[in-house]
Image (tube, grey):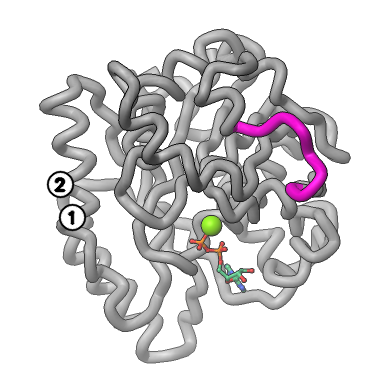
Amino acid sequence: MAEIIAILNQKGGCGKTTTAVNLSAALAQFGRKVLVIDMDPQGNATMGLGVDKRTTERTIYDVLTGDISMGGAIIGTEMSGLDVVPSNISLSGAEIELSKEVGYHTILDMALDGVASSYDYIFIDVPPSLGILALNSLVAADSVIIPIQAEYYALEGMADLMNTIHLVETRLRSPAPIKGILITLYDSRTRLGREVYSNVKEYFGQTENIFKTTIPRNVKLAEAPSFGESCITYDEESSGAKAYLKLAEEIIQLEGTEDNK
Ligand code: ADP
Ligand code: MG
């Protein structure tokens, strides 16, 4: 059964999509079967994995509205072992439409039932808000990775995020523990980078796992999506690719040690 991991932070630009794409590709490189669910109407993960969001016919929107099954929306990528369920702007109407459904927060969770046994990992790229799409992602997820950009205000909004995770656990009885906090866009040479790192440690260090791997700022990570590729295939020797490969190893080391599967 796949471990379903939501990549979550309501802050835009903190590296959610970059992490969804590159961590998935890195795990596929290590032989894992991985599916990326693009839950963001911007469709950046879709494009980043080489699927054209403007022309793709079956998207996560059609799955959530019940028109097709999850299996019917899966598209293979150039990389073996790495698939994607695409998204595009059509998903932006879903928040309102879905809110009229009974049990609307469980729609993604149920839709994933049919495909979870075919993968080792399913990553959900969550949009930057704590709305219905994020709620569906949290209910579906076994755990959460929170990317945090090493910048001032990195922890702003964190209380809301923690509160949402907590409410999903207590009110919906669907716990999604934090698998790890991931420091992104990190530069250990700057004082700011080091300061943010120590703030994050102070905030989470006692209670949550902070991944040992940090993701450096690396232009290759920003370039790769314009070629419809992860950095793992675009430039495996880049510091960005190496960091995500290291993170994948860290995650592989956790396999079998957690009881939340
Ligand atoms: P989010 O999905 O959280 O909004 P993205 O992953 O889309 O964030 O990242 C925001 C922007 O920053 C994108 O243009 C992306 O290419 C770039 N970016 C993300 N992580 C890095 C990194 N480690 N180094 C350089 N650029 C990055
Ligand atoms: Mg994104």
For mark 1, give the secondary structure: helix
> Would residue 248 be visible to someone looking at this image?
yes
For mark 2, give the secondary structure: helix
Q: Is residue 196 magenta?
A: no
Q: Is residue 59 magenta?
A: yes
Image position, residue 186 (x, y; %): 48, 75
Image position, residue 124 (x, y; %): 51, 38
Amino acid type, residue under disc 2 in the picture: Asn
Residue located 32% across and 31% down the image: 99
Which residue was labeled with disc 2? Answer: 163
Q: What is the magenta segment's predominant secondary structure? A: loop
Image position, residue 152 (x, y; %): 31, 83
Dividing the picture into quadrants, the one containing residue 203 is bottom left
Which residue was labeled with disc 1? Answer: 160
Relative to 141, say whether 132 is above or below. Answer: below
Image position of 217 (left or right of 11): right
Image marks 1 and 2: residues in contact by CB distance under 8 Å: yes
Image position, residue 207 (x, y; %): 17, 47
Q: Quadrant where the C terminus lies?
A: top left
**Disc 1 beta carbon < 8 A from ligand 1?**
no
Residue located 75% across and 61% down the image: 225
Which portion, as a residue range, is magenta?
53-60
Q: Nearer the viewer, residue 11 or 122?
A: 11
Which disc is residue 105 wearing? none
